[in-house]
Amino acid sequence: MEDKNNLDELKKQYAMFKEKYELPEFSELNEIFDVEEVDVETDFLLRKIRRVVSERIVGYLRFFEIILNPANAPMFAFKMIKKLEEKDKQNLTDIYERLGTLEFELVKLDLEYSEEKEVEFIKKVHDVFLSLRKDVLVVVNTMLNGGGGEKKERGSYLG
């Protein structure tokens, strides 16, 4: 019951910021970034929301880093990575660079708090994720299901 009360209070407080700053709908932000995990017992609610949002950015960055630079990738990933075409890798590189820029902005926000800049960042990340979603899904589906033209498998080290 306490979790429900926290979520209701979070929605209520978010609604005030949404009205003031024209933020995205809570349900949409929550669907993408799981912001319902934010504890409302804070004087810096937007900062807390931005930090939850930033966890998603960092997670995707690390995932793409493994794909683009698989030196330390888990063994199971190599077979999936080999399915990617050059255009997929270029697409991922572009996404990686956009998310990397956001990560630098996160550091700046941590060092210089501003409610308005927190709002700008939340809006920006929301828009970036919406625009990248389709491209990321295409690449992930290629890795899971293979590309249009199957690449020939070379023998493994053991066979």
Image: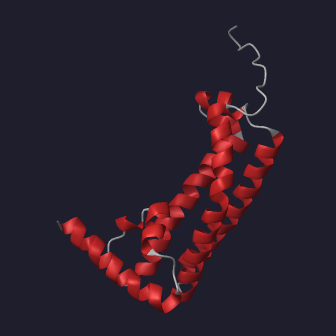
Task: Determine which quarter of the picture holds residue 70.
Answer: top right
Q: Up-down: is 108 above or below 43?
A: above
x%, y% of residue 76? Answer: 59, 28
Horizontal side of residue 27 vs 120, given as left or right: left
Q: Residue furthest right?
A: 86
Query: In the rendered image, which quarter contains the C terminus?
Result: top right
Query: In the rendered image, which quarter contains the N terminus?
Result: bottom left
x%, y% of residue 7? Answer: 29, 71
Which residue shows up at 57% across the image and 70% down it? Answer: 126
Horizontal side of residue 150 vs 3, given as left or right: right
Which residue shows up at 36% across the image and 67% down it? Answer: 36
Which residue shows up at 66% across the image and 59% down it? Answer: 132
x%, y% of residue 107? Answer: 59, 71
x%, y% of residue 120? Answer: 59, 81
Q: Residue furthest front?
A: 148
Total number of numbered labels?
0
Closest to the observer, 55 or 71: 55
